[in-house]
């Protein structure tokens, strides 16, 4: 195996960080390395969500358990990729893009683009809030509180920006 602190497991494979940003799949049964290398993988319901660059175009690709592409959308997730419910959220160089998964009636689509001033490297979703952390330590939280219930109704309004000094 190659180094890193990330490990994810599905029914057939485990995924570990490579020396560069990205992961490699290994067969769970015998530990044999495969050629499958999804980036920022999110494993959910037998699918593997991956933030990739294809011919210099950032893409979110979703693979089935057979590691074949099920669907894809042009969206920048090179910073991070998370799944909030059934909504993939991608962090790119200058925006965070919530995406809608495809249905029988329509293809996958970018729901909105949330512009950011800093390249984001990590996304966290909790309590209906979206928290983004940039590579230089700037933290941003997005959401809107409902005065009656204290819950977030929409993740398009930036509510906190904190610059963390190292």
Image: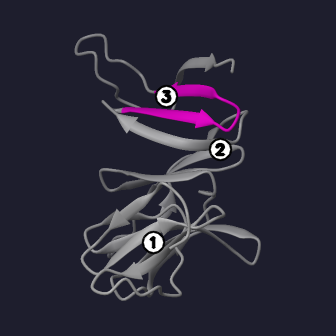
Q: Residues within 10 Å of mark 3 (few under 14, many from 20)?
A: many
Q: Secondary structure at mark 3?
A: strand
Rendered location of residue 136, percent (x, y): 71, 32
Determine if the magenta segment contains residue 122.
no
Rendered location of residue 122, percent (x, y): 54, 43
The stretch in magenta equals 129-142
Q: Secondary structure at mark 2?
A: strand
Rendered image: mark on residue 95: 2
Q: Would you name the residue on which mark 3 appears?
A: 142
Q: For residue 152, what is the image quadrant?
A: top left
- Decide: is 68 above or below 148: below
Residue 35 falls left or right of residue 117: left
Rendered location of residue 129, percent (x, y): 39, 30
Rendered location of residue 144, percent (x, y): 42, 22
Q: Would you name the residue on which mark 1 appears?
A: 107
Q: Is residue 129 visible?
A: yes
Of residues 99 and 35, the one drawn nearer to the viewer in this rendering: 35
Q: For residue 49, what is the image quadrant?
A: bottom left
């Amino acid at each position: 195996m190659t180094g890193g602190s990330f490990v994810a497991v599905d029914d057939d494979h485990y995924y570990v960080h490579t020396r560069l940003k990205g992961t490699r799949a290994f067969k769970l049964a015998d530990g044999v390395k495969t050629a499958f290398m999804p980036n920022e993988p999110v494993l959910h319901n037998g699918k593997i969500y991956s933030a990739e660059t294809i011919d210099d175009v950032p893409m979110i690709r979703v693979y089935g358990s057979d590691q074949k592409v099920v669907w894809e959308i042009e969206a920048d997730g090179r910073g991070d990729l998370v799944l909030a419910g059934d909504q993939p959220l991608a962090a790119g160089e200058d925006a965070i893009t919530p995406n809608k998964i495809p249905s029988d009636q329509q293809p996958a689509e970018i729901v909105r683009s949330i512009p950011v001033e800093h390249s984001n490297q990590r996304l966290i979703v909790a309590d209906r809030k979206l928290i983004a952390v940039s590579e230089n330590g700037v933290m941003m939280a997005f959401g809107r509180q409902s005065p009656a219930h204290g819950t977030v109704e929409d993740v398009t309004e930036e509510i906190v920006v904190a610059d963390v000094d190292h």
